[in-house]
C-alpha cells in the first residue's frame, strides 16, 4: 500500500510535460514613412485660419481688438475638411475670459467653401463646443 502513493506521484509527474519552445514570431513590419497627406497643405492651413478668424471677427465688435491663443489646425476624416480649434478673448487683455471655439472648414479646391462655427458664448453653446473639441480636435 505504501507504493500506491509513490506510484501515483510518479504518474502525475510523468503526465506533466514541458511545453515545446515557441517558434519565434515574425517581427511586425516597420510603419510606413509618413506621407505628405498626413499634414494639410500649408496654404490650406492658412486659408482655414483666415476663415476661422473671419467668423470670430463677426462674433465680436469689429472695431475692438481681440486675441487668440492655443489655435491648432486638425485634419478631419472627411476629405478636404480641416478643423481650427482655439480660444478667443474679446477684449484682447489677458485678464478677460478665454472662450473656446471650433471652426470646421470644408474646401473646394484650395478655397474654403463651407464653414461651421461653434463659439462658447453661453452655457448651452459651451456644451456644444466641448463636444466638438473632443470630437474634432
Image: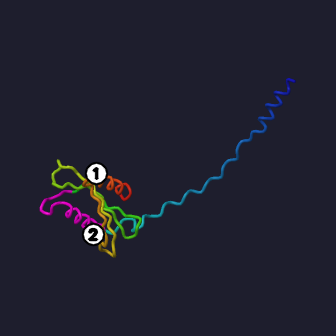
- The residue that label 2 is drawn on is 47
Which quadrant of the structure image shows residue 119?
bottom left
Tag in front: 2 or 1: 1
* Residue nearer the viewer, 123 or 60: 123
Asked if residue 48 lies in the magenta stretch, the reply is yes
Asked if 16 appears above or below 9 in the picture, the reply is below
State how far apart marks 2 and 1 are (Cα). 30 Å
Magenta region: 44-67
Furthest residue in direction left, as rendered: 63
Majority secondary structure of magenta residues? helix
Residue at image point 71% right, 42% down: 18
Q: Residues within 10 Å of mark 2 (few under 14, many from 20)?
A: some
Count all numbered tags in the image, as a single digit: 2
- Tell me residue 10's x, y (percent): 80, 33
> What residue is shown at x 31% (from left), y 70% (from top)?
114
Q: Locate residue 42, reporting x and y percent.
A: 30, 68
Packing grade of label 1 (10 A; few <14, some 14-19, many >=20) is: few
2 vs 40, nearest the viewer:
40
Quickly name the residue at label 1: 123
Amino acid at each position: 500500500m505504501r507504493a500506491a502513493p509513490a506510484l501515483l506521484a510518479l504518474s502525475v509527474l510523468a503526465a506533466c510535460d514541458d511545453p515545446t519552445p515557441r517558434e519565434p514570431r515574425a517581427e511586425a513590419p516597420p510603419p510606413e514613412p509618413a506621407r505628405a497627406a498626413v499634414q494639410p497643405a500649408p496654404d490650406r492651413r492658412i486659408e482655414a485660419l483666415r476663415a476661422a478668424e473671419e467668423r470670430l471677427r463677426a462674433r465680436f465688435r469689429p472695431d475692438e481688438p481681440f486675441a487668440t491663443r492655443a489655435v491648432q489646425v486638425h485634419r478631419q476624416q472627411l476629405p478636404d475638411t480641416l478643423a481650427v480649434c482655439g480660444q478667443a478673448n474679446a477684449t484682447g487683455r489677458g485678464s478677460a475670459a478665454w472662450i473656446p471655439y471650433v471652426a470646421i472648414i470644408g474646401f473646394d479646391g484650395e478655397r474654403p467653401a463651407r464653414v461651421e462655427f461653434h463659439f462658447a458664448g453661453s452655457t448651452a453653446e459651451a456644451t456644444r463646443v466641448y463636444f466638438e473639441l473632443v470630437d474634432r480636435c
